Amino acid sequence: MGVYQGEAMIISMKAHASQEEIEAVCARIQESGYRVHTIQGDERVVIGAVGTGDVTECLESLQAMPGVETAVRISAPYKFVSREFKPERSRIRVNGTVVGDSEFVIMAGPCAVESERQILQTAEAVARAGARVLRGGAFKPRTSPYDFQGLELAGLKLLRRAKEETGLDIVTEVMSDGDVELVAEYADILQIGARNMQNFALLKAAGHAGRPVMLKRGMSSTLKELLMSAEYIVAHGNPNVILCERGIRTFETATRNTCDLAGVALLNEVTHLPVIVDPSHATGKRSLVPAVSRAAVAIGADGIIVEVHPQPEKAVSDGAQSLTIPQFEAMVKELAPYIELWKKARAPVSCASA
Ligand code: PEP
Ligand code: MN
């Protein structure tokens, strides 16, 4: 299939460019073997082009065409997900919730769906406390093949029940390309886990899933690799990707992983995709989750995804990093003033005339 093939250009049309001029530019781009993505801005049309072909020659001829303001090559190895391609942030709509806009989105729930009682109790509590999305794995990637692997389809059905009861949207992990269709029937957001960040067959399938995807950073992956994986999903047809910093492996072992918060700030510079932080997997320790969540707000993340369990000591996975329900409620209250500041920082600067 002729998707992402390495070169990309951005063509900004003049503010008064005519429809004929725009169409002529698109035709010229296509003749050169590129795919066209037109972005209608407030003032001007911007045309993105991705494909193969002689960029230099194509750029030269485009620059000479009527109505063209500038035509430049995108230098980043990732194209569709770069800020060069799209300077304004992407807003990912998940039913009534928008990730990457003016709301700091809290996703919460257990590591794994374990029982009806466990998931419903957690869902009701986190919804009441202010979460917008319920997390919970039905398919679990476990280091040991002898550990609990998830309730699978029965777990997905329980998540649906929880959604019906609470109105929360569902984020849940899909581990293989063959399961994408099934999981997409139940999930509002498909989670691709750290261990699968470079499962390219899965990334391609997620491109056709028709659902937003939350892509977690691999535990030994660079930010560039994370962005290249996101590029796979977008290049295969799905622009709705949320990135998730969940900590990486370093020489430090006192925390489960090392939370790369500076990486979140860097992602915000180089990509238009929303970025959320997972303070649970990033630390492995429930006492650290509130502090890292505050830091996620301060660094400009778009939300957090937090593990919460009604009885963490009995959890089948990740109990040590799961908050109890009262701890989650307290944390959300404590975050509120920080989120207020976040909203002020996020609000578009008004250009009130003097
Ligand atoms: C999870 O969210 O429970 C999980 C398995 O996360 P990660 O892929 O980041 O390890
Ligand atoms: Mn977990």
Image (spheres, grey):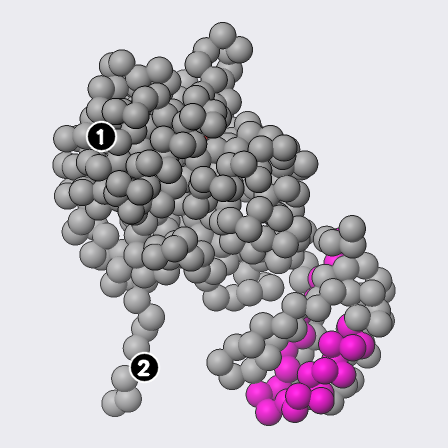
Q: Are marks 2 and 1 in contact (CB under 8 Å)?
A: no
As drawn, 250 above or below 296: above
As drawn, 91 above or below 25: above
Q: Is residue 254 in sight in this rendering? A: no
Q: Badge 1 is on which residue?
A: 121
Q: Position of residue 119 (x, y in %)?
A: 29, 29
- Secondary element under disc 1, as helix, strand or loop, is helix
Mark 1 beta carbon near ligand 2 (under 8 Å): no
Please give the count of numbered marks on the rendered protein: 2
Instruction: Please tell me which of labels 2 and 1 falls first in the chain.
Output: 1
Question: Would you say 113 lies left or right of 210 here?
Answer: left
C-alpha span from label 2 to label 1? 47 Å
Residue shown at 18%/42% (left/top)? 129
For the C terminus, give its image quadrant. Answer: bottom left
Task: Look at the image and give the residue range highlighted in magenta.
Answer: 5-29
Q: Where is residue 15, by image quadrant?
A: bottom right
Mark 2 beta carbon near ligand 1 (under 8 Å): no
- Of residues 44 and 241, which is closer to you in this image? 241
Q: Is residue 156 in sight in this rendering? A: yes
Q: Badge 2 is on which residue?
A: 351
